[in-house]
Image: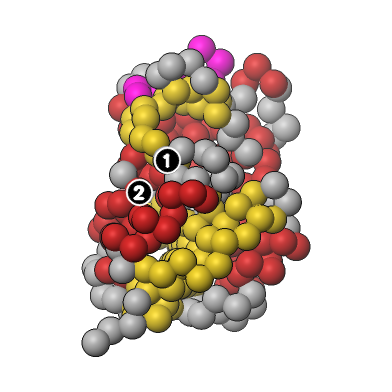
Amino acid sequence: MNGVTAALDLYGLGLAGRRRAERSHDRVRARTQDGRLIALPLQRWLRDPSRAEHRLLRDLEGPVLDVGCGPGRHAAALHARGVAVLGVDIAATAVRLARARGAPVLQRSVFDLPPTGSWGSALLLDGNIGIGGDPLLLLARIAALVRPGGVALIELEAPGEAARAFRVRLERAGAVSDWFPWALVGVDGIEALAARCDFDVTRVEPSRGRWFARLTRAPGP
């Protein structure tokens, strides 16, 4: 198996497997090229949002764009509250699971959306700032989608974690994907990244061992 398609297939198998209470030797793992393993909290992604996540979402202005929405727990929660929301994800299994829980979702890359500058908020949670291995390019795309004064809610690594880009692959029961680019951004690096994309960092806060930043798009002229 190789390429992004293989990675998406393994990711989909992992999501489906967690729903079937898969055996430990069948679990999907992510491995970096230097051999480090990165945990994939598939069970959390399949559950409803925690109370802490609901608190983070409650004051977001719509319409909300959930980038890399996965099985759609955040999009479904916002939709259930009557907030206009759209999830986007390129993984077919994730999109199917998201729709099954009532989330409005498109199987599409964020880079395929028109840069309308009309979204009220955007979500980059569960490490999705790393999509494509270029956080600057991704956040600049979000800036083109979100209206002036709009918000980007981003999950980050803990303080002291250096921002870095690397290559990773997915592994499951002897099957592996090809290497693909990913990135991490820590709390210490978000100010500089946001400034380059016309965002102001208005809040950084921990929540149950995770870290989140709220960025506000600079007002128009």
Give the quadrant of residue 150. bottom left
Is 26 drawn above or below residue 193 in the view shown? above
Tell me if I can see residue 5 in this picture: no
Q: Amino acid at mark 1?
A: Ala
Residue 96 x, y percent position in the rendering: 51, 51
Q: Is residue 186 visible?
A: yes
Residue drawn where x is 44% and y is 54% of the image = 190
Residue bearing the label numbered 2: 135
Q: Which residue is mark 1?
A: 163
Name the one closer to the observer, 151 or 102.
151
Check the image and name the residue furthest to the top.
Answer: 174
Task: Magenta stretch: give its range.
Answer: 171-179
Please name whichever residue, 65 or 56, is drawn nearer the observer in this view of the structure: 56
Residue 114 rendering spot, x and y as whole percentages: 24, 68
Q: Is residue 175 magenta?
A: yes
Q: Nearer the viewer, mark 1 or mark 2?
A: 1
Q: Earlier in the sequence, mark 1 or mark 2?
A: 2
Residue 187 in magenta stretch: no
Relative to residue 180, is residue 184 depicted above or below? below
Please indicate whether residue 85 sits to the left or right of residue 219 in the image. right
Image location (x, y in percent) of residue 170: 47, 25
Residue located 41% across and 69% down the image? 200
Q: Quadrant of residue 8?
A: top left
Q: Residues within 10 Å of mark 1 (few under 14, many from 20)?
A: some
The mark found on residue 21 in the picture is none
